[in-house]
Amino acid sequence: MWTAVDHFRQGILAWVLGDHSAETFQALWDILYLWKCYFYVTDGWKVYASVEPGDHIISKRMTRVEGENTRLRHYLPRLHRKTLCYSKSVDMLQHSIGLLPHYFKYREIPVFG
């Protein structure tokens, strides 16, 4: 799971599921690019520079991202590294992850009839 966060606000701005490839980052970048961000900060993984050159800052101070990842793992047991209690289905994982940021932001879970 790849996440994008705002350094100054709590919460996840965007996320995608996938491996550590440039294709997965490209899917996330396609979402972020629409927001016309001035710069982006990453941990220096090699695929970041290959997708979008420009105002890329490399830093190991990724406390906001790590905090959000910890919060996701806390509230979604299916993200624990070793668990037998929950389905590892990609569809269920996407639905679970999609609901949690919505709940954090609006304090309600949408119910579709």
Image (cartoon, grey):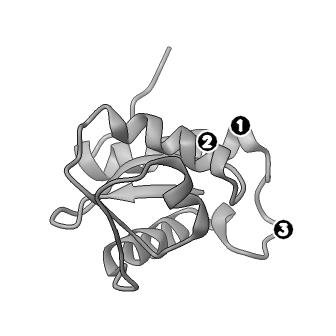
- At x 78%, y 71%, the residue is 83
Q: Residue at x 55, y 42 (%)?
A: 26
Q: Residue furthest top?
A: 113
Looking at the image, which residue sits at the far bottom?
A: 60
Query: At 31% across and 41% down in the image, what residue appears?
Result: 108
Identity of the residue drawn at 45% across and 35% down: 30
104 and 50: which is toward the camera? 50
Q: Residues within 10 Å of mark 3 (few under 14, many from 20)?
A: few
Label 1 sits on a secondary structure element that is helix
Q: Does the CB distance between marks 2 and 1 fall below 8 Å?
A: yes
Amino acid type, mark 1: Asp
Of the two numbered discs 3 and 1 on the same chain, state the one appearing first in sequence: 3
Seen from this angle, which residue lies furthest right? 84
Q: Is residue 62 above or below residue 28?
A: below
- Between 88 and 24, which is closer to the camera in this rendering? 24
Residue 34's quadrant in the figure? top left
Horizontally, residue 80 falls left or right of residue 15, namely right
For disc 1, the marked residue is: 91
Q: Looking at the picture, how far across and down is residue 47, in whole percent?
A: 59, 59
Q: Disc 2 marks which residue? A: 94
Residue 60, quarter of picture? bottom left
Q: Amino acid at mark 3?
A: Leu
> Closer to the observer: label 3 or label 1?
1
Query: Circle 3 sits on which residue?
Result: 84
For the residues marked 2 and 1, what is the alpha-carbon distance in whole angstroms? 5 Å
Q: Is residue 20 above or below residue 60?
A: above
- Mark 3 against mark 2, which lies toward the viewer? 2
The quadrant of the rendering that contains the N terminus is bottom right
Q: Residues within 10 Å of mark 1 (few under 14, many from 20)?
A: few
For residue 17, say whether it is visible.
no
